[in-house]
Amino acid sequence: MRSNTLSRRANTHQNLQWLILAGLGLILIALQSFALYTVFTSKYPGANDFFVRWLGGREYLLNGTNPFDRSVAEKAQLSMFGRLTRPEDKDEAYFAYPLYTLYFFWPLSLLPYAWAQAIWMTLLQFMLLAVTILSIRLSGWQPPGWLFWLTVFWGIFFYNGARAIILGQFSILVALALLLALWAIQNRRDGWAGIFLAVATIKPQMIFLALLFLLLWALARRRWWIVGSFGASLLVLVASSMLLIPSWPLDFINNARAYSDYVAFGTPLENLLHYLLPASVAAPLTVVLSAIFFLALLPGWWLAVRSAPRLPGVLAVDGPYTWAIMSTLIVGSLITFRSATTNQVILYLPLFFFFHRLSHFLSPDEKKRVGDRLGNIMAALVEIGLAVLMWSVFVVTLDGNWEHIMMHGLLPALMFGLYAIAWRGLWRPAG
């Protein structure tokens, strides 16, 4: 009896702590949103990637207009550029997301854009903070305090993450949903895993290879709740949004095709190769390398499916499964069509896993002499070096007011190189 009373008190105390933390978080978000509105968004409207979605949601909520309608795109063009776009323009501002994307921000469409932008950018910053910390935890990396806070700071201001916030990109929400799904899978919370994977489909090009692997792995391991929960959640999202606008799946496909017509770039690998090599070489090489990279994933997938299941915990406790996740995120970021630098915040996870394995590349004598110090210093230098490199290349290759498309392939190519060179040490389960 006394044990039950103590247990209830402990649960009440824990719930109270979470409520206090949630309240403090809301206060902090409100204060930062107000400050951002006062200093920035009320004077300098931006975050164009969010603006198009905000306007689509606003037109539907206030006027009943289909967000995929060309009239909405034309309103966005006039607001963003002061005129209708021409064929040579790089952005025609189509609503090119599934309609159920509205569920994740619709209250903001009822606010003036300056306020909506301030709140959304603040939320993205906190989501990116969560992506960074969750990536550290899932990778099994345990940096000391100074390096942990350096990495948290780095995660917000690193080129790919900072650009995603500036543009108001949904890629951060997708990355967070995918990482939460991986956390749920590792902790046997399979229902939640399926829900988070369904949420991540708001940008399918960003996660489709990882999603395919995880569903195949779940089927092979008879983790039926992952597959069932994903299917049911996606069905709810699609069916409920079709009650709002029955034609939206076809409208989405049409807008996605239009988007492909005016956004004149291919996969990150293609963009990078065309920058480095003549077109006559880059075009066939893109096809060949994309096929090789994808086929190279399959043995890792097979071994992950066939290996004996391990205890739940961080990803690093299961070598084949971990390798499959990390390599799939990297290869997917290289060969996925219409992907961009903002989508590559998902590469925080394989980068931090590489840091976790740094000490395993040392000889026994080196481990005894320097412990983890050398690995921590190397991790800090890699973070600083990557940040300087990405921002420098961005500035040097700036194409007018636009990011050069070769940037799309730079980070995943560097990550691919790291994993290709050190694959033996990365493959072994972390001890």
Image: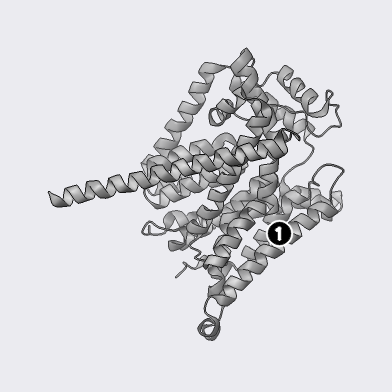
Residue 138, image x, y percentages: 48, 56
Label 1 crowd bin: few (<14), some (14–19), many (20+), radius 10 Å: some
**For residue 33, which quarter of the picture?**
top right
For the C terminus, the quadrant is bottom left
Q: Is residue 164 above or below residue 372?
A: above
Of residues 103 and 125, the one nearer the viewer is 125
Q: Is residue 327 visible?
A: no
Which residue matches tag 1?
387
Residue 309, image x, y percentages: 38, 57
Q: Is residue 98 above or below residue 40?
A: above
Q: Which residue type does callout 1 highlight? A: Ala
Residue at x 56%, y 76% (from the top left corner): 373
Residue at x 41%, y 41% (from the top left corner): 192
Horizontal side of residue 420 vs 74, given as left or right: left
Q: Residue furthest top?
A: 63
Residue at x 46%, y 58% (from the top left corner): 315
Q: Secondary structure at mark 1?
A: helix
Horizontal side of residue 37 vs 87, given as left or right: left
Residue 269, image x, y percentages: 73, 50
